[in-house]
Every structure is written in structure tokens, then in C-alpha cells.
Image: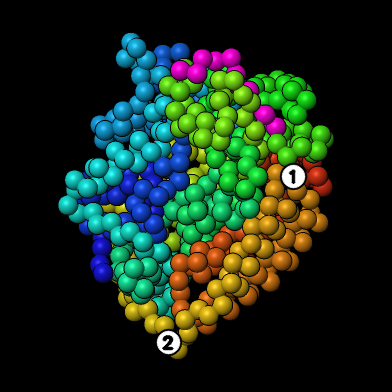
């Protein structure tokens, strides 16, 4: 299989990039491990933040982003991404996204925690799904994009892996190994450029708002290939996932608080005023820690979200998905409180990239939640993620186009995959036990509030798990569960090592052993050669 460029993942980042590359005349392959619409994007409720109102401006959006990022944002990256927003909104509209408008035809702008203005463009409360559907329709209309569903990317192939890298030469991409779940075989793909757009890492935690595909694949593959990763300690726990005794965590969008919902503890008290002057519209890290504190103080499994008193028809119109889901659970949100609890939601760090998506390996790019551009800093401002995805995808398309046309693009072999004498897996129960231990360890020891002792215990357990899983990987034929588990254990260990390296509390990383912020904010960068 031979393509000009390969995209791993079919969310907003990957599809946006693929469309632009195809329109530039390149032959593109998209590999996605489930159906093409099974993405983090498809679950995004809130919307996309951009300056489109006359009462708003770029400086306000930049300031809000920097405040939320708690001193760790790259201000240049923030300004460039924010400034590029309106043009990309126009582009999404041209691709067929129909954002919700007011009666006068102007955008219906939502507001979420940390935003000083209403600037969230949305399609009711299923923005991600609407964008995904529009982009997939465009993809289907282009003849030079091929989508491979049920194909799991295993590893990036680089020149150094083939032994052809000369001393002093920068490593570069030559191809990719992918597992075809229906054909039950590994395919070898030759390409000059790979865009990782694999989404987040939420599934390394016991409770997450993410779909089951969010297993950190891109970060793990990039790190194994030799790319730098950064700021993986900053895991955003969404404050308001719907509590369920069976463990599912349906997301209750922050936009609900933006429309006036109030958090209450088990005593019925509105408690956010004790923790922040912005009350229920404080940034997510503050709200999540406040909820965690109230739950521990009162010994309760959840708190309540109160948007009662608003007409049912109004709530149905603004939040149709949330309203219908709650009704299914016996909760009428116009009359009843919603039980909510924090859950792992968003990775603010990732594969370290420039603003064109490029990494430390030539031909390897990353975009979306898998990447760390410097926009989010220590805490992502709500609804900046979809903005980042479309802006960086646009930048990357031009950069990759230039790279593919250059004389310096990487040329190299991709050895055919060989199973050798490995056996079919015969103890799959071991994989499930390992995954359960991984998720429970991360939830118990690497959660909202951390300590050095807990992190060290978690690291010791994860190191042992990684050795077991690697041994299993090299002795048995690959299959989806093993591919994901191998990636999850790598990412989990990297998160813990990043958290141990940050000896301060900043943004989403809060440790009882180092509760103060250091005067100088620096990125936590991990390199493969350190391990």
C-alpha cells in the first residue's frame, strides 16, 4: 500500500487535514480503528470557541486562554490560533456545518467556564457530531481519499528502524504498520508523511467521558518512534459527568453551567462561591477540585447540578441530547437536580509540535488532542480544542504539501511485517486483568489530587505491567485489545513520570507535596532516549 500521506484517526483534526491535502492533489489514506464516525469529535457537545461577535475581540480570547492555562501557555501559539479562528469557522460553514443561529440570523453564542464573553459557536448540544457528519460528506465527494475502517495503527516506521539512518541525520517517516481486524492480518503501508490525529487518553482511567477508542495510541506510537512528548501530567477532569452506579459517565456539557446551572452539594448548598469568585463559571480545574473537596468533606459519591426552574421546552431546544439522556434515566432536568461527578476528559499535553503540526521526526505530524502546541498550557479553556484542531490542520496541510514536493523528503524502505513463530493469544483474560489494574491504579493514584508517594506507587505498578505486556506483545500475534493495551500502558507511565517531574502545583496538576507554583513555568518534555 502506497500513499502520499497517511492520516491515523477520523475526527475533526484528521478529516480537516485529509480534505485539504486531497484538494491540493495528494493521494490520502485515513486509517480508523472503528467506524469512521467513532471519534472523540463525535462526542463533543459544547462547541468551538472563536471571536465572531462585535462585543468580543482577539485580545479578550487570548487573555481568557492564558488565564486558564495558568502561566504555561505559549502566548505566540495562543495568539496565532485565536487569530486564525474566524477564517476556519467560515471554512466549516462552507463545508456544510450549520451552526445554531438566533432569530435574527446572528450566531447563537454560548458561554462556558473561563470565558469572559459569549463566543462558543455550537449546533445545539451535538456540535461535534454535526461537524463530523459535514466533513465526512466532503471526504466522500473527493476521489483521492480512501478510508480504511477497522484498521488499527500499530507503529510508525522510520528510517532509523530500518538501519538506514546516517550519523547526524534527522530521523524521518517511511511508513506505517496497521492491523486489519476483518482480514486478521497486518498491512505494511509506505508513505512520506503521517498525520497522527488519534484523539485523547481518557481510557487509561477507570472513569472517563471519552469513547472507548481514546487509548492514547498516537502519543504511544510517536514516543516509540522517537518524537518528544510534553506536559502529559495535565489531565483535564471534566467536572460534570453524570453519576451512575454502573460506571458509565455521560458528559453534561459545561454549556449547561454557561446557561445558568448551579452546582450544589448534598446539603443543597451552592458551594462554588467558597472556591472562586467566578463561582460556577470558574475554569474546569478549579471546579473539579471544588467538587472533589465537597464530596470528600461530606462523604458523598456525587454533587448536584441544578438548572431547574427553566422551561422544559427551552432546555429541550438548547440541550436535546442531554435532556433526552436524563429523561431516559428518570430525571427531568427542568424539575430535578442532575447527579454529577468529575471524570477524566481531556489531555492538555501530547506529542510536542510546532504550529504546523510538525514533530521532532521529519514527516511525522500530529494534530488535535494528541498534540501539544502550547495553546492549552496547564489547563484547556473550554471549546478551544476544536478551534486548535481546524487551525493546526490547515497549517499542517500547507507544511506537508511543501515537504512532499521538496527534495529533502524522506525516501526509505518499509520492511514487510513478519509474525515469525509467535502464537495466537491463548490467555486473553490476562489482558483484561492488566487493563483493569492499569485503570484502577491511574484513578486511585494519579487523579485530581496527587502526592509523590501515590505517584511513586503507581509508577512501580505500571513499570511491572509494561514489562508483562511487552513480553506478551512479542510472543503472541497482535490483535486489537493487545495493540490498545500496549499503548495505554506506555501513555500511563509517561503521565506518571511527567507528574513526578513537576514539583509544583499548576493548573490541572495539583499535588499536596508541592502546593505552590514555582516562579518560572516550564514544559515537562520527555524524550525516548531518557528511558
Residue 5 in view of the camera: no
Residue 114, by quadrant, is: top right
Residue occupying image coordinates x 70% and y 44%: 448
Q: Which residues are magenta?
A: 303-313
Residue 74, horizontal then vertical, whole percent = 54, 39
| Residue 458, x across and y down, in percent | 72, 60
229 falls in the magenta region: no
Q: What's the residue at 55%, 73% (across, down)? A: 428
The residue nearer to you, when weighing 22 against 479, is 479
Q: Are marks 2 and 1 in contact (CB under 8 Å)?
A: no
| Quarter occupied by residue 84 | top left
Residue 302 falls in image quadrant: top right
Q: Earlier in the sequence, mark 2 or mark 1?
A: 2
Closer-to-camera residue (156/125): 125
Residue 420: numbered disc: 2
Mark 1 — residue?
449
Amino acid at each position: 500500500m502506497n500513499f502520499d500521506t497517511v492520516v491515523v484517526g477520523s475526527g475533526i483534526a484528521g478529516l480537516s487535514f485529509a480534505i485539504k491535502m486531497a484538494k491540493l492533489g495528494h493521494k490520502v489514506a485515513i486509517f480508523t480503528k472503528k467506524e469512521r464516525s467513532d471519534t472523540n469529535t463525535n462526542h463533543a457537545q459544547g462547541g468551538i470557541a472563536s471571536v465572531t461577535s462585535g462585543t468580543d475581540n482577539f485580545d479578550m480570547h487570548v487573555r481568557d486562554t492564558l488565564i486558564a492555562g495558568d502561566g504555561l501557555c505559549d502566548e505566540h501559539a495562543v495568539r496565532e490560533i485565536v487569530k486564525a479562528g474566524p477564517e476556519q469557522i467560515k471554512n466549516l460553514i462552507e463545508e456544510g456545518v450549520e451552526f445554531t443561529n438566533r432569530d435574527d440570523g446572528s450566531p447563537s453564542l454560548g458561554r462556558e467556564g473561563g470565558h469572559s464573553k459569549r463566543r462558543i459557536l455550537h449546533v445545539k448540544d451535538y456540535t461535534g457530531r454535526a461537524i463530523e457528519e459535514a466533513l465526512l460528506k466532503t471526504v466522500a465527494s473527493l476521489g483521492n481519499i480512501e478510508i480504511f475502517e477497522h484498521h488499527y495503527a500499530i507503529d510508525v516506521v522510520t528510517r532509523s528502524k530500518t538501519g538506514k539512518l546516517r550519523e547526524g541525520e534527522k530521523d524521518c517517516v517511511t511508513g506505517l504498520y496497521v492491523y486489519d481486524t476483518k482480514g486478521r492480518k497486518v498491512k505494511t503501508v509506505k508513505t512520506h508523511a503521517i498525520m497522527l490525529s488519534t484523539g485523547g487518553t481518557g481510557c487509561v482511567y477507570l472513569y472517563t467521558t471519552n469513547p472507548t477508542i481514546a487509548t492514547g495510541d498516537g502519543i504511544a506510537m510517536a514516543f516509540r518512534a522517537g518524537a518528544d512528548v510534553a506536559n502529559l501530567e495535565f489531565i483535564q477532569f471534566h467536572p460534570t459527568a453524570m453519576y451512575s452506579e454502573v460506571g458509565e459517565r455521560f458528559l453534561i456539557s459545561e454549556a449547561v453551567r454557561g446557561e445558568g446551572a448551579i452546582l450544589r452539594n448534598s446539603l443543597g448548598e451552592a458551594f462554588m462561591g467558597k472556591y472562586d469568585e467566578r463561582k460556577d463559571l470558574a475554569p474546569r480545574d478549579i471546579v473539579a477540585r471544588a467538587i472533589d473537596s465537597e464530596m470528600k468533606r461530606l462523604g458523598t459519591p456525587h454533587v448536584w447540578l441544578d438548572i431547574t426552574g427553566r422551561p422544559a421546552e427551552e432546555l429541550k431546544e438548547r440541550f436535546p441530547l442531554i435532556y433526552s439522556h436524563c429523561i431516559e434515566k428518570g430525571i427531568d432536568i427542568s424539575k430535578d437536580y442532575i447527579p454529577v461527578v468529575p471524570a477524566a476528559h481531556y489531555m492538555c499535553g501530547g506529542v510536542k509540535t510546532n504550529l504546523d503540526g510538525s514533530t521532532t521526526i521529519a514527516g511525522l505530524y500530529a494534530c488535535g488532542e494528541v498534540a501539544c502546541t502550547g495553546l492549552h498550557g496547564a489547563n484547556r479553556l473550554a471549546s478551544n480544542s476544536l478551534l486548535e484542531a481546524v487551525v493546526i490542520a490547515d497549517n499542517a496541510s500547507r507544511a506537508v504539501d511543501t515537504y512532499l514536493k521538496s527534495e529533502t523528503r524522506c525516501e526509505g524502505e518499509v520492511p514487510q511485517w513478519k509474525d515469525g513463530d509467535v502464537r495466537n493469544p491463548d490467555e486473553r483474560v490476562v489482558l483484561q486483568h492488566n487493563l483493569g489494574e492499569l485503570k484502577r491504579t491511574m484513578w486511585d493514584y494519579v487523579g485530581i489530587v496527587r502526592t509523590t508517594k501515590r505517584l511513586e506507587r503507581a509508577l512501580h505498578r505500571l513499570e511491572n505491567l509494561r514489562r508483562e505486556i511487552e513480553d506478551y506483545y512479542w510472543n503472541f500475534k497482535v490483535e486489537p485489545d493487545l495493540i490498545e493495551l500496549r499503548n495505554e500502558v506506555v501513555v500511563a507511565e509517561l503521565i506518571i513520570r511527567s507528574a513526578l517531574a513537576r514539583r509544583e502545583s499548576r493548573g490541572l496538576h495539583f499535588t499536596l507535596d508541592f502546593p505552590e507554583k514555582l516562579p518560572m513555568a516550564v514544559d515537562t518534555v520527555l524524550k525516548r532516549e531518557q528511558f
